[in-house]
Amino acid sequence: MDMLIFELDKNTSKPLYEQLYLGIKNAIISKRIEVGAKLPSKRKLADFLNISQTTIEIAYAQLLAEGYITSKPRVGFFVEAIDDLPYVQKESVLDPVVPVLKQKFNIDFHPGKIDLSGFPFSTWRKYAKNIFDEQYKELLLTGHPQGEYELRTEIAKYVFQSRGVLCSPEQIVIGSGTEQLLPMITQLFDPLSEYAIENPGYKTVNRILKHHNRTIYPIQVDDEGLRITDLEQTNANIVYVTPSHQFPTGAVLSATRRSQLLNWAAQQTNRYIIEDDYDSEFRYLGKPISSLQGLDKNEKVIYMSTFTKSLMPSLRVAYFVLPNSLLSQYHKIFTYYTSTVPRFDQHILANFMRDGHFAKHLNKMRKSYKKKHDRMTETLETYYPGIPISGEHAGMNVVISVPNKISEIQLKEKASEHGIGVYPLSDYMITPIDHQTPQFLLGFGGLEIESIDDAIHKLMSIWNIERANPSN
């Protein structure tokens, strides 16, 4: 088959991929496309219909999943016989997220990527080998509900030394990530409690709170972080913030707003702050920003953090620190709880921290990420001075504003078609925010430092952004 002709309406609310999927499916059902016919390649059909290859890919993937077509590696897609199907739907509404289509990019600017080459495998292997021994057979049994005391002790030391968090091991609860710990925190409060979250922000938090039927107020952030005056206009009594390095903008909550936020929490007994300190280890300019928890005198801050960025995402170790005022409520509710992190993993990490290897690893990675950070910002500032950069003093990504006449979605698709993954700021918006200039997160954590210059130049070339001559 040379080509498929379908009328696609770009002005309707129905996505193009869904229109294409339905068109091909109905053509197969009505026998207008014969069994065994080879469908056009994604590239040819994208060119013919003047749409992105990603749109074609999503449509083909859904047809493949439903059995209308089959795929032959390095050959193409072919129409299947549908006589054996148990039913044929007249129409279906697709979920805009198709998991099987997680695209792999040649260049990936994802902000969550880490440097895999820096992990101390030999050291970690030694601790793992030592702990998997018969003398530690009691670790085969379930441990303390809040996590191993040895690990909680090391975490308490670490957060005090690095973040000024004041706590004892008894205040720490260890779990396997935000997805598991945040629902636990919400159960400490009245089910009618109302939550304020940052916008743009970490969408997983929004999903978790919605899943638990909590009322949510998205609060806009600016260069100084969460806008406290906007928070005060809501009925929220719990607020989730990333004050040390707001995700995704990179803004730091200013000293004035920190005071305002703590004062806001102190005004009513049912008000609390959930402080997510997800990547505070990586700051490249000035002194580390103190935690809100360390400044709090009224036991109003629940401190959260993770080893995802500092060590590895797959370890699945995170924790929160409860104020003493909430401990009795925690013990009352979670009498049934068992820690979701394997005891062996907890002891490996505790020993790794106890002997100074975690601090050593952090210092090494901090230097590595700073070099990558400096290379990225220097390349952008030198060759593309017309592109403003923000959020560049901490974390593992910067935010750029792209002066372009086409939309964020179009820019993203153009990059994707050339094997480059970029991530619009709008992807992280809880509710839409008007912004004239397309903005993108450019992560550098997973890039090799030698490849950063070339990666940026390729991206800018695809976007038709002129490269400056620094000698002029």
Image (cartoon, rainbow, N blue to C red):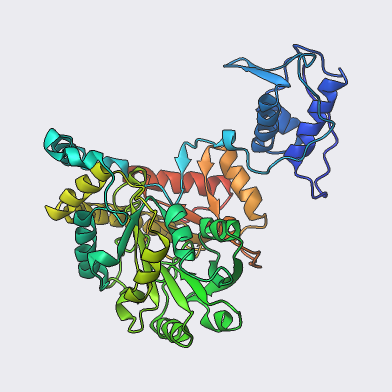
Give the residue displayed 42% in from the left and 44% down from the top.
454
| Number of disc labels | 0
Is 368 in front, or is 20? 20
Give the residue displayed 49% in from the left and 56% down from the top.
441
Dividing the picture into quarters, in which one does residue 342 lie?
Answer: top left
Is 348 in front, or is 405? 348
Give the residue displayed 34% in from the left and 58% down from the top.
319
x and y percentages locating residue 153 in the rendered image: 20, 61
x and y percentages locating residue 334 in the rendered image: 40, 59
Q: Give the quadrant of the N terminus.
A: top right
Q: Give the quadrant of the C terminus.
A: bottom left
Dividing the picture into quarters, in which one does residue 242 lie?
Answer: bottom left
Residue 448 left/right relative to 87: left
Is 197 in front, or is 332? 332
Q: Is residue 469 visible?
A: no
x and y percentages locating residue 415 in the rendered image: 57, 44
Is 149 in front, or is 386? 149
